[in-house]
Each structure stands twice: as C-alpha cells, then as structure tokens.
Amino acid sequence: MKCLVGVLRSIGDWMNKQLRIPDPYSNKKFDATENSLESGGLPMANGNSEEPVEGSDTHSEASSEASDALTIEQRRAYKLELQEGISLFNRKPKKGIEFLINANKVGDSPEEIAAFLKNASGLNKTLIGDYLGEREDLSLKVMHAYVDSFEFQGLEFDEAIRAFLQGFRLPGEAQKIDRIMEKFAERYCKCNPKAFTSADTAYVLAYSVILLNTDAHNPMVKNKMSADDFIRNNRGIDDGKDLPEGYLRSLFERISRNEIKMKEYELAPQQIHSVNPNRLLGLDSILNIVIRKRGEELETSDDLIKHMQEQFKEKARKSESVYYAATDVVILRFMVEVCWAPMLAAFSVPLDQSDDEVVISLCLEGFRHAIHVTAVMSMKTHRDAFVTSLAKFTSLHSPADIKQKNIDAIKAIVTIADEDGNYLQEAWEHILTCVSRFEHLHLLGEGAPPDATFFAFPQNESEKSKQAKSTILPVLKKKGPGRMQYAASAVLRGSYDSAGIGGNASGMVTSEQMNNLVSNLNMLEQVGEMSRIFTRSQKLNSEAIIDFVKALCKVSMEELRSASDPRVFSLTKIVEIAHYNMNRIRFVWSSIWHVLSNFFVTIGCSENLSIAIFAMDSLRQLSMKFLDREELANYNFQNEFMKPFVIVMRKSSAVEIRELIIRCVSQMVLSRVNNVKSGWKSMFMVFTTAAYDDHKNIVLLAFEIIEKIIRDYFPYITETETTTFTDCVNCLIAFTNSRFNKDISLNAIAFLRFCATKLADGGLGSSSRNKDKEASGKISPSSPQAGKDGKQENGEMADKDDHLYFWFPLLAGLSELSFDPRPEIRKSALQVLFETLRNHGHLFSLPLWERVFESVLFPIFDYVRHAIDPSGEGSPGQGIDGDISDLDQDAWLYETCTLALQLVVDLFVKFYNTVNPLLKKVLVLLVSFIRRPHQSLAGIGIAAFVRLMSNAGDLFSDEKWLEVVSSLKEAANSTLPDFSFILSGDGIIGNHEPALSREDNGGSTVSGRPDDDSERLRTNYLYAGISDVKCRAAVQLLLIQAVMEIYTMYRSHLSAKNTLVLFDALHDVATHAHKINTDTTLRARLQEFGSMTQMQDPPLLRIENESYQICLTFLQNLIEDRPPGYDEAEVESHIVDLCREVLQFYIEAASSGKISESSSGQHHWLIPLGSGRRRELAQRAPLIVATLQTICSLGETSFENNLSQFFPLLSSLISCEHGSNEVQFALSDMLRSSVGPVLLRSC
C-alpha cells in the first residue's frame, strides 16, 4: 500500500513541478496564481525524450515539448499494433507473422523473423515451436536463422539444450522435432568443433537427453531410468565408439537433478485471446503472476514476493523494456490509464474491510493523490470514479453505520475540495452532495427542526395547528433524546444515490440504532466547519468557480425536489457564494450569473409555494447586494441580473409569488435608487407584466409603485440610460389598458402627459447613441427612415433633437387608445395626445413630423378608412374591437373620429410652416374619408376639408392650391353615383356581393327553396345598390357645396389654372348626372322600384343643376377677375361650349317624346307635356336664365362671333314648351337687348 501511495505521490509531485502547481502542503497555496488548464492544453516543462534532462526555462528547448508527448504516443500506438500481431500469432502463427511483416513491425528476412520470435514477449511458446518445425520454405529458413542466432561455444551439452529450449516448447510431431534437433546438433558442433566426432553424435545425444528429461521428471513414468541404463542406451553413438562414461554419468545427474524447462512468464491461457489495452501495456501480466501463483498455493507470502521480483527482473531484462525520461505531462495520462482501475480496487477494498488506522490513512492518502493527478490531467472518467468511491466511503447516506474511518473520509473530501478545487469540474457535485448531507446530519445532531417543517403542505387547519404543536415547539425546547424524532428518517436512509427514504420496510427504528446514531452524530463534530469550502470559493479560478456554481445548483435542485424532506441548505449557500464572488471581473460574473439565473427561474416557478417564495427572497437579497456595486453607463449587466424576476413574473401561476416579486422590485427601487442603471429595464418589464395580470390586487399594487417611481424618481430613470424612458412609457401604456380600474387608466394617461413634458424639457440625459432601435418599438415598419438619416448626414442632430425619437412609443401608445371601448379613456387619450403635440410640436423637425403623421396620427383612422360597412348600416368590420357594439361604433364615429380628424387638421394648420410638405398626405387622408360609401364618414371628411381650407387657405402657395383642387377633383370623380346595377338586371348579384355579405349574414332565416333564396338575394342586393347610390348622391351635393364655399372664401387666391381644375371637376359631375337623368330606361326601372328607392325623377337633377350653375359662376368670375395665368380665348371657348351644352340639354328635355310621327312620315299634333316633365323643366329654368344672361355678358365682338352658333338654339327655345315663364322673360330680354341690335347693325 505504501508503494502504491508512493508511486501516486511521486507522479503528483513530478506533475506539479512540470506544471508549476504550488505544493498543496505548503501554507502559501492560496496565494499562488490561478493555474488553469486552458482548452485542454497543459503548460509543460521542457526537455528531451531520450535522456533525463533538468526542467529548463530556456526558449530554445521549448520546441521539444510537443514532440515529446508525440513520440510517446507514437511508441504506444506502435506497441498496441505489435501486441495485436502477437495476439494473432498466438492463434494462427503464419497469419501473425504475415500481419507483423505488413505492419512493418518485423522485417521480412528470416533472420529478423527469428530475432522477433526469440526476443518478443507474449508469444505462445508452443506455437513458436510449431512454427519453427514447419517444413515450408520460409519457416525452415526462419528455424535455421533462429538456431544460428545461439552462441553455444564453451557450453556443456545439457546447458546448450537448456538455453535452446528456454524460448519455445518442442512440438509434438516427430518430424518437426527431428528437423529442429538436427539443426541444433549442427550448430552445437559448429560452435564446439572438438566436442564430438560428428554432428550425428550430438543429434542422437540430444534425443537421449530429451528422453531422459521426460523420464526423470514426468510423474506418469513409474519405472525411472538409472544412470547405467542411460549409459547403455548411448553406446556406440560417437561414430561407432562410446562417449566417456564419466561424461554421460555427470550429464545424467545434472538432468535428473534440474529439469530442462521453459521460462514461465508467458500469459495465462485464458488471456491469450483477448486484446485489452491494459493487458497489452503489460500490467495484467504482473497481476497474472500473483493470481496464478495464488492458485498454486505457495507456502508463504514471502515466496510470492520473491517470485514476483524474479518476474519483474526477467521483464526488465527483455530487450523492449527501455526506460525513457519523461518531460511531457501528457505521458501521465497513459500511465494512469494503465493503473487506475487496480489502484482504485487496492484503495477501496481495505478501506471498506479494514479498521486499521495506518491502512485507512494510506488508502485515503492514495485517494487524495489519485484524485489530484486525474483532476489536473482532466481525466474525467477516472477522476469521477475515485471521487464517487471516496464519497461513498463517507457513509453520510447511512449515518447509523458511521465509524471513525468514515469521518476521516469526510475530512479527506474537504481537503480535496481545498487543494484541488480548480480542477474538479463536474466532480464538485459529489463533494457538494457530501457537504449537503453532512450539514443535514449536523443540524439533526444539534436538534434543529428540519427544513421540511417549514416547507411541508399541511392538508387542513387542524393539521396545521397539530403540526405546530407537536413538531416545532418540542424541538426548540428540548435538546435531549426528543430531538431525534427527525433523525429516524436518517437512520433509514438507503443507498448513496438515493436521496429519499429506504431501508427498513417496517419503518421502525430500534433503540440500539437510535443510540448509534446519537453517538455517530456527535462524532461529526470532529470534522469542524464545512463552510470554508464556500468561503474559499473566491480563491477558485475563473473556470472552476463556474463548475462549482453549476454543481451547487444541481445539488440544491436535488435538495428542493425531495418530496419527503425538501431542504434549502445549498440554496442559502448559493446566495453566500454569489456574495463572496461578486467582486470577480464582469466577464466571469456574467457566466456565473447565467447558471444562477436559470436556477432561480426553475425554483421560482416551483409548485411548492414556500420554496418558490424562499428562492425569490434569496434572489432579492442577491440583487440588493449587487445593486450596491456601481454600474457604468451603457452596460447591461444589472438588466441581465434582474431577468429572473421578469421570467418568473411571466411564468409563475402563483399570485403570492407575483406579488412578492413586485414588492421585491419595489424595495430595490426605494432603497437603491441611486445605483439602479440598466436594471430599470427589467423593473419596468416586471411592472408591464403586472399591468396585464388577471388579479386586480397585483395591478393596483404595481401601479401604486409605478406612480411613486415616476413622481419621485423620474430623473434617475433616464440618468444614464435614456432608453429606459421607452420602457417606462411602454409600462404606462400597459396600465392604460387595465380592465380593472378606470382610474388607473386615466392616471396612466396623465403620467404619459407628465413624461411628455419631461421629454420636451430635455429632461433626459443627452446621449449620442442611435435611438431608432427603441423608437421603432411600436412603430410600423413602413415608417419613413430617410428623414432621420438625412438629418444625421447633415450633422444637424442637435442635443435637443436627439431624444425626440423617444416620442414615438409615447405618442403611438396614446394613439392606440383611441380604439379603447371606454369613451372616457378615448377622450382623455386623444386630449393628451393632441395637447402634447400642440404644446411641444415646435420642437419637432420635419422628418419627425413625417413619422408622427405616418405612424401616430394616420393609424387612428386606418380602420375607418378600410373597414366600415359600405351600406352604412351593418356592423363594423374586423378593424374595430369586437367589444364595440353598433351604438358604440356610432359614438366612436361621431365623437372620437370627428374630434380626432378636426384635431389633426388644427395641428397641421398650427405647425403649417414646418409641416407644409405633408399637405398631400393630409389631403389623401381627407379624400379617403370622402370616398367612403358611408354618409357620416364622408360628411366628417368634407367638414374637415372645409375646416382645413378655412384655417390654412391664406398660407397656401399656388402649388399647394393645385394639390387642393386636384384632391377635390379626385374626390368628386370617385363619388359619382353608379346606377349600372339597375340596368344589368341579374348582374347585380355579382357586382355588389362583397358590399352585402355582412348584412346578409344577419338576415332572416334562409328558406329551403332555391328560388326564394335567389329572389331574396336579388332584393337585398338591390337595396344595397340603391342605398349606395343615395349615399353617393348626398355626398356629391355636400361636396359641391363645400367646393363653392372654399371657392367663395379664396376666389382671389386661385389662379386661372386652379379654377379651371375645379371647373373640370364640377363639369364631370354635371355631365355624369345629366347622363343618368336622360337615361329613359333607367328612369323607367327606377319608377318600377319607386316605393323602394324613394328617389325623385330624374334622380340627379339637383346635382346637375347646381354643378352647371357653379361652372357658369367660375367662368364668369374668371372673365371678371382676370387672375394670373388667365387666357381669354380659352375661357371664352369654355363659356361658349358650356352655354351651348346647357341650352341643348334643356331643349332636348323640353321636346323629348312630344313629337309623334305617323308611318307616312307626316307631322301630327304636338302632345302637351305631362306635369312631371313640366316640374323638371321648371327646376331647370333658373339655370337656363343664368346661361342666357352669361351669353349676353360676353363682349360685343365675342357675342357677334358666336351668335351664329347660338341662334338655332334660341329659336328652338322659342318654339318649345316651358315649365315656368322665367325662361321666356329672359329670352325676350336677350332678343331685345343683345340679339336685336346685332341684327339691326348687320342690316
């Protein structure tokens, strides 16, 4: 045992020297620099692989380090292949030799093969003999070379035979023996020419000697040969003469006394066929000597030792046993791989079976050295095998059986943790499991109640009180035997691997076991304080501390998962070691926290509420300690540190845990507000999660704390990290959606106003970081980026402008609230949104305003523009929240939407100087309202249009006016009523299907008959089409009035070009209306559906009249005002064309259908007009009067030039019927005052 320990100690010392690891037994061990085995590469001493060299630090020798290990590795590979060939030879000699020749392990000449057979160890001697006796050419040559390699000069004949037969066993076949002995005799005579007359003599004598050897030493031969018999048998063999009798007699005596036999160091038969690396590397052959000799029952152990020494000497004598001076530590791996298993057995068995103090001390020292070497060399499997075995010998899993040697094993574990902590890696888990069990027993010994008392789940109240009385109190009062009631379970503990209760099936504990346990627990006092393992964790190197923390988390998880006996020992230690190691460099601490973070999340979501609460409280303690450290700006570590709170807050199903987290975070803010930097991000995430919680109390509690933070600590929030402002805003927005309490939502909106004020005051620490990332949190990806980029390129990003990008989350959040189902919230949000923009808009640059309009203001109207039912009667589309009913939708339209649109317009007007490039976008928004087939929406849009014009018209340039009039033209063209569905008959279904699908869904029950079905569908589509037409007609009237109103206000601002655009727009409306009004088929169909349509006939007469009327006004005013760009000829041609068109249409209307023709083509009497037609003509009369007056107002030249075109129309007017006499009066005036003088002049 001393030798084995000595071997391991010397290996360890050499390794420490090579790796410059400080001596673990010196007091300075903890002051040494950290030695880490970086990425598997070992720092190695220098040297040369052939002869021993003192470790040298010179650079010149460093290059030999790498080759050193490589050389050994190559030799090892060579030896393994060689042994494979030997193993094959021992089964099939010819194939074995062939393999070895091909693998270049043996040369292919007979001499080289012979030398291999003679010198290689591990070859089966019988098979060597068989191979040498073969008569094949190669075997024969090898046999000759084999025999010739012996030097028999000066040897007695029996000595020569003895030497010859030591290397192989003679084969059983006579011819083979004959060939071998014949060659032997020849060689002997060659070496000793004077010994015999000829080789024949030696050949015969050799046979005689072999026969004598068998006769004398084989127990099966009963009648032994005498010396005289031997002499007689060999008469006349020396060429007919006798050999000297004395020579033969002495030969006989030497053979009889000392048997000729092979050296017995070949492998045992059972090992011949296996190729196992340990065997190949020679160790099993040493063990085999012991095992085999034990079987042969040597008299004493001295004989055994003596025999082993002989065998070792013999192995050392063999030519391949060369000793190399190792300088490369990697070589230790190969050595350890060979000997670790037997050593583990050698240390484990005595430790288990013996109570001898010296033996146990040696075993434990052996374990310590073995663990040191395997750990430093990163041999994980081997290290874990030793550590696990030692951990089992502590017997902590079965405390009733603890003896002094187990206490020593515990001490050894503590020493190993102290000395080799840097190299233990995963093996820490076994050591910390022992520490955990030790502490558990230690507590039992002191009589403290186990953790389970605090973490158990009592079933009901009575059990709670019972538990309180019967368990906790006596334990605290008594320190005697009563304290052992918890220890009973410890006695019954099962195997090393089981954490639960095993052992006695009955579960009863005998008093003897109890007494044993009491004395054993008292023995534990010898071990002393275990906590030094944790305090010294700060001395571990960077990799080791992470392994240590991982193992501790694993052990803690096992402790807490125990169903019967959950414990928090390791959990408390996690807090301790995190505290001890908090001053490590940030990079290492990040890695440690990555492990701890996952652990706390798992435990925080535990089903056992008490444990989860304990974990969260532990995390709080840690966070408080961590927040004592200063964090520099722009770091993110506090945020990472607080992440577990956020994750547990989101995942935990227990209300108590969520409430605890809010209180923990609250405490952190209130007590460490000066130090919180990036931690704000996680804190706000916790509160944001709380805002969406299902429990009212949590929402209220969280909001109460947020209120306090924003009121009292707002400057701290953005002190170093301006991005946290965004998190704060997002958190408030989450509270505005609270469904529990309206006041919370309103207060959150008020706080958003407060945040906006702070933002506008420049209250956020200035920072040059690109904030676009945070700003885009709630912004649609389509937001234009170019403006911002452009601004940065020009270098105009002023400090004050820098944080303007924080406006987005705030403004977008408020804008989203305009969809809230609660009217108060909608109103308050819009109020704050627009108030903020009004008050602080002067700070905004154009790119920022672009983003505000695109991403904040326009989205308020998105679903209005796309999703309201065209009929104006159905339910709202998908865009509006399902919560909003029809009534709410109307309220939304008339209150929120109208107000919002007005506010957008007012905002645009207020900041027109900055935002004027956005006019087009605002106009597109308004036109999209007007185009909606929904009278209320279109009305809102038109009203907003007029409001915009009346407030901002004075500010518009000519280009801007062109945009305005073009928008009006687009609006007019897109709202033209479409009557085609009435004419297309069955085609209605196809055209208006989408418009009515929703209304249909809510309709009456569908009848089973397809005819009824299609009839009902037709009717529905007809209704939809008619309501759409009526809606469009109403919108067109509103639009015409709005155009006139705007024109009246800004007549002086409009250029001729812009006025003509308006003229075109209204002219299009008028011609379209006229086309409808004169379509007799259409009017007839409308008459049929009279009750359904409730439309006058003709349907669009008012639109036609008003449009033409305004067109005339535009042209007359153009002539009168002569604005910039006025072209007299162009305007005049417009007037002439328009007047002719109007008169022509009137004459057609007055005369249509009144002339009937007979088949003979002769005219019949005129049929007088019906009352309906008279009414229509009466309505058209004012327009005709105005037209006649316009013609009169033309200049004299112009009037004369165009009179020829008008005269036929005037004469037709005279001859047709009229609905009122206004036309005739006007016509008479015109003829008298204008036409008459021209005619007179021409005469």
Image (cartoon, rainbow, N blue to C red):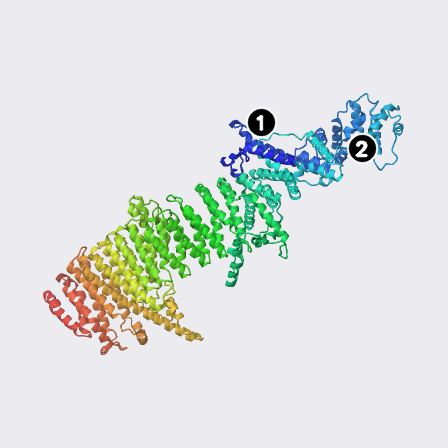
Q: Which residue: 66% across, 31% down? A: 321
For residue 870, what is the image quadrant? Answer: bottom left
Residue 173, given in percent of the width and then of the height, sits at: 81, 36
Q: Which residue: 70% across, 36% down? A: 96
Quadrant into which the C terminus falls:
bottom left
* Residue where numbered disc 2 is placed: 177
Q: Residue 893 carries which label?
A: none
Relative depth, front residue between 927 and 1093 = 927
Residue 566, given in percent of the width and then of the height, sits at: 53, 53
Q: Which amino acid does label 1 sit on?
A: Val
For residue 203, what is the image quadrant? Answer: top right
Please tell me which of labels 1 and 2 falls first in the chain.
Answer: 1
Q: Residue furthest top?
A: 194
Quadrant into which the N terminus falls:
top right
Q: What residue type is labelled 2?
A: Ile
Identify whether 755 is placed above or below 152.
below
For residue 745, what is the image quadrant? Answer: bottom left
Residue 583, given in percent of the width and then of the height, sits at: 44, 42
Mark 2 Cα shell of 10 Å, populated few (<14), some (14-19), many (≥20): some
Identify whether 1098 is placed above or below 956.
below
* Residue where numbered disc 1 is placed: 53
Alpha-carbon span between mark 1 and mark 2? 51 Å
- With 134 as the anchor, is 536 left or right in this view? left
Identify whether 798 is placed above or below 862.
above
Residue 909, given in percent of the width and then of the height, sits at: 24, 56
Indicate which label's residue lies in the foreground, 1 or 2.
Answer: 1
Relative depth, front residue between 150 and 435 = 435
Task: Give the structural element (helix, strand or loop) at label 1.
Answer: loop
Task: Give the structural element (helix, strand or loop) at label 2.
Answer: helix
Relative depth, front residue between 399 and 1125 = 399
Mark 1 Cα shell of 10 Å, populated few (<14), some (14-19), many (≥20): few
In the rendered image, is residue 862 in sight?
no
